[in-house]
Amino acid sequence: MNATSDLNAIRELNMSYLMLARRVLASDREAAQSHLGLSVEMADLLLKLSPEQAQKLASSSQVLCFFRMSTDAMLAGLATRSNDATMSAVANDALLAA
């Protein structure tokens, strides 16, 4: 049962990442490629995914995103951000810092 829960959590994380990546690529491709660490080819592939393909990719048992924080100070700064900050704001800051 725990394995099923873990796989569901990975699928949800992957789908959220794919949706966010596609949204930022569509709005500012160069910046998004830099922030996400994507090649031109990978960015093209992500933007061309159909909803069914994205769902299938998200259902993989592997996490599609990774942390690219270069310093402990960056992570510590994000972790100690004001309690008034929403998780969405912290996640966006982390993505932009990557």
Image: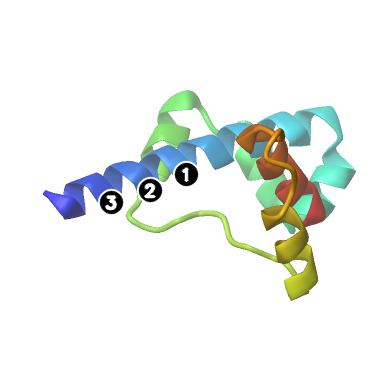
Q: At which x and y percent is residue 16?
A: 53, 36
- Marks 1/2: CA–CA distance: 6 Å
Residue at (66, 32) in percent of width and height: 86
SS class, disc 3:
helix
Q: Residues within 10 Å of mark 3 (few under 14, many from 20)?
A: few
Q: Which amino acid does label 3 sit on?
A: Asp
| Kind of residue at disc 1 | Asn
Query: Can residue 38 be seen in this snapshot?
Result: no
Query: Nearer the observer, disc 3 or disc 1?
Result: 3
Per the rendering, the mark at residue 14 is: 1
Eyeballing the image, is 31 above or below 63? above
Q: Which of 51 and 64 is in front in this view?
A: 64
Of mark 3 and mark 1, the one earlier in the sequence is 3
The reply to whether callout 3 and callout 1 are in contact (CB within 8 Å) is no
Query: In x, y percent, where is residue 43?
Result: 71, 45
Q: How many marks?
A: 3
Q: Residue drawn 71% across and 52% down? A: 41
How is colour applied across the structure in the image? rainbow
Q: Residues within 10 Å of mark 1 (few under 14, many from 20)?
A: many
Badge 3 vs badge 2, beta-carbon distance below 8 Å:
yes
Q: Quadrant of residue 83?
A: top right
Residue contact between numbered discs 1 and 2, judged by CB atoms under 8 Å: yes
Give the distance between the C-alpha atoms of the residues marked 3 and 1, in whole angstroms: 12 Å
Q: Mark 2 points at which residue?
A: 10
Q: What residue type is labelled 2?
A: Ile
x, y percentage for residue 15?
Answer: 47, 37
Q: Mark 3 points at which residue?
A: 6
| 56 left or right of 49 in image | left
Picture residue at 77% right of the left edge, 45% below the top: 93
Q: Specify the label residue 28 is tagged with.
A: none
**Who is closer to the viewer here, 2 or 86?**
86
